[in-house]
Amino acid sequence: MKHYILITLLLATGLLAAVSPATPPTTTITTQPNSDKELAWVDEQIQAILPTRIGVPDGFINALRDPMKMKKPVPVIKSGSLLPPPKLGSTVSAPKIIEEPLRLLAMMNKSVLINGKWYKVGDHVRAYTLQEIKPNSVLLNGPKDQKLILFLTKQNNNIKIITQ
């Protein structure tokens, strides 16, 4: 802003000199730097932040729980894992092992994710062989030419469809 005022005054005096060249300019414009005022303001700001600040004591911070500690994972019994043998002399029959049904979870390029494990064409999935990958399904060939088709399921619990 000061520069615009200064330029305006210089132009005005230049125009006056051009209009009346016989009269020399009697006023001189001098600008005084405001650096002393600006430095005084900076010194005030520095003095305002110099006193030590009171914060949370170290003992309080050390007593807080660590937010990054992970809970111990719960052991997961995978399908097909062996159970401990029954005790001798007991008449307990062997427990039935129920396998989780095969689910096609994702497809990417030439690989598919079935029950949390990635497979390609020709890989064995339990008693089946991955025979073909289609755009939204896979074809598994089992024993005795048993064919099984798994479709890609999309599940999103955040989306709710309400029909009335």
Image (tube, rainbow, N blue to C red):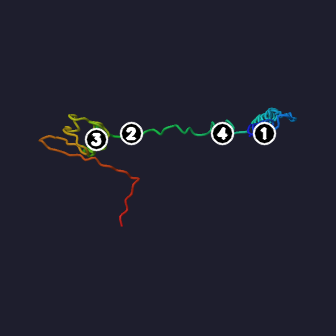
Outermost residue, left direction?
144
| CA distance separating discs 2 and 1 | 88 Å
Label 1: few (<14), some (14–19) or many (≥20) C-alpha neighbours in 10 Å: few
Label 1: which secondary element: helix
Label 4: few (<14), some (14–19) or many (≥20) C-alpha neighbours in 10 Å: few
Quadrant of image for the N terminus: top right
Of circles 2 and 3, the one toward us is 3
Q: Earlier in the sequence, mark 3 or mark 4?
A: 4
The answer to whether marks 2 and 1 mark residues whose Cβ atoms lie closer than 8 Å is: no
Q: Which amino acid does label 3 sit on?
A: Ile
Q: Which of marks 2 and 4 is nearer the N terminus?
A: 4
Up the image or down, 161 lies above or below 24; here it is: below
Q: Earlier in the sequence, mark 1 or mark 4?
A: 1
Query: Which residue in the structure is indicated by mark 2?
Result: 75
Of circles 3 and 4, the one toward us is 3
Q: Which amino acid does label 2 sit on?
A: Pro
Q: Quadrant of residue 97?
A: top left
Q: Where is residue 40 in the image (x, y as percent from the top left)?
A: 81, 34
Q: Which amino acid does label 1 sit on?
A: Ala
The answer to whether marks 1 and 3 mark residues whose Cβ atoms lie closer than 8 Å is: no
Q: Position of residue 65 (x, y in %)?
A: 57, 40
Label 3: which secondary element: strand
* Residue at the (80%, 32%) spot, across then down: 35
Query: Which residue in the structure is indicated by mark 1?
Result: 12
Of circles 1 and 4, the one toward us is 1
Of circles 2 and 1, the one toward us is 1
Query: Which residue in the structure is indicated by mark 4?
Result: 60
Label 2: which secondary element: loop
Q: Can residue 135 be seen?
A: yes
The answer to whether marks 1 and 4 mark residues whose Cβ atoms lie closer than 8 Å is: no
Q: In which quarter of the image is residue 4?
A: top right
The answer to whether marks 3 and 4 mark residues whose Cβ atoms lie closer than 8 Å is: no
